[in-house]
Image: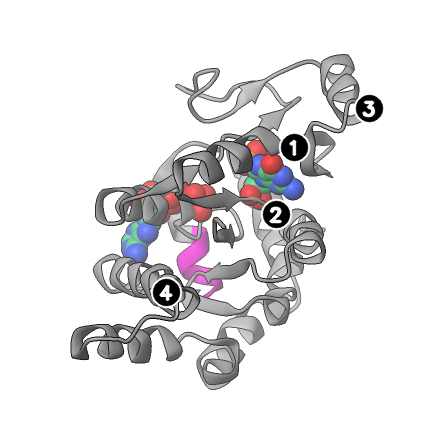
């Protein structure tokens, strides 16, 4: 049985960067490419970042039961095709999903052993700086993303692991440890010393063990918003 990993994060936290790093380090993972009704942005290509389809096409896929989960995010549909899980199972690989909180909840209901990971920025100022520095969005969009992030971040307690993406190298190592240690846990085989160390490292990012670290981050998002933010 394939393991399913769910990764969610507010925009700008570094999720794409981390997932790209993980791709280089962990074998036998299928990366699900979602379907969406939103238009491509920047250099995005159909079939690489997303499959870009029309609303009627998306609704036809819903009716045919093609989605493992789907949700409406920022006024557009986004969905994970069942075919990616089928492909992962056929290959004997695990499946990685980059989906939002609503999608994560649906997957957890259908596949309770799915492993969920929430990525947090170190604080609100850093998120704002990263969004500006990425230079993909205008001021208005950045303000909206920050306001959305404040709401999304409140969902962190629904996830199994919380990763604060401060130093990229450390976060990448932590993400790798989480993925590999969950594989070990589900394989039930005896662990080597290295594997025990890996599991201990992953354990540090379990929800129960990060409350102290996360509290000030959540607080940095909870302060009254500046004018123009909703
Ligand atoms: P997301 O996919 O979550 O929207 P990105 O991966 O596009 O976020 O990252 C947002 C910006 O922050 C990018 O410019 C990226 O290079 C930068 N970034 C990502 N992780 C880190 C990090 N740990 N430290 C500093 N900058 C980072
Ligand atoms: P963006 O438009 O910025 O690429 O993505 C917006 C949000 O949609 C992100 O939070 C992303 O994780 C989420 N998303 C992307 N694909 C899916 C999907 O297939 N299902 C769900 N539920 N959310 C998705």
Q: Nearer the viewer, mark 4 or mark 1?
A: 4
Q: Is residue 141 shown left or right of residue 70?
A: left
In this figure, which residue is indicated by the disc labeled 3? 63
Query: Label 2 to label 4, Cα distance in Å?
Result: 19 Å
Compare marks 1 and 2 and give the one earlier in the sequence: 1
Among numbered discs 3 and 2, the one appearing first in the sequence? 3
Picture quadrant of residue 192: bottom left
- Residue drawn 35% across and 73% down? 202
Q: Position of residue 185 (x, y in %)?
A: 40, 70
Q: Which residue is mark 4?
A: 178
| Of marks 3 and 1, the one in the foreground | 3
Disc 4 from disc 1: Cα separation: 26 Å
Magenta part of the chain: 122-128
Assess whether mark 2 and mark 3 are in contact (beta carbons under 8 angstroms).
Answer: no
Any atom of ligand 2 within 8 Å of the CB at mark 1?
A: yes
Measure how far apart labels 3 and 4 are at the Cα level: 36 Å
Q: Which residue is mark 1?
A: 78
Q: Residue under circle 2? A: 100
| Labels 3 and 1: the sequence-earlier one | 3
């Amino acid at each position: 049985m394939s393991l399913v990993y769910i990764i969610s994060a507010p925009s700008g936290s570094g999720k794409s960067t981390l997932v790209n790093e993980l791709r280089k380090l962990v074998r036998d993972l299928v990366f699900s490419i979602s379907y969406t009704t939103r238009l491509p942005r920047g250099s995005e290509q159909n079939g690489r970042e997303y499959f870009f389809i029309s609303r009627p096409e998306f609704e036809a896929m819903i009716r045919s039961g093609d989605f493992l989960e789907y949700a409406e995010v920022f006024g557009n549909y986004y969905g994970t095709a069942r075919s990616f899980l089928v492909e992962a199972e056929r290959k004997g690989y695990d499946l990685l999903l980059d989906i939002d909180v609503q999608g994560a909840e649906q997957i957890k209901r259908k596949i309770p052993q799915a492993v969920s990971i929430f990525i947090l920025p170190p604080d609100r100022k850093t998120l704002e700086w990263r969004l500006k520095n990425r230079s993909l969005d205008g001021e208005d969009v950045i303000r909206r993303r920050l306001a959305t992030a404040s709401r999304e971040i409140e969902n962190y307690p629904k996830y199994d692991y919380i990763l604060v993406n401060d130093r990229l190298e450390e976060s990448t190592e932590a993400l790798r440890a989480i993925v590999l240690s969950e594989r070990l846990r589900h394989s039930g085989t005896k662990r080597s010393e290295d594997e025990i160390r890996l599991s201990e490292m992953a354990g540090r990012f379990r929800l129960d063990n990060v409350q102290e670290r996360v509290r000030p981050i959540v607080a940095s998002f909870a302060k009254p918003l500046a004018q123009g933010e909703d």
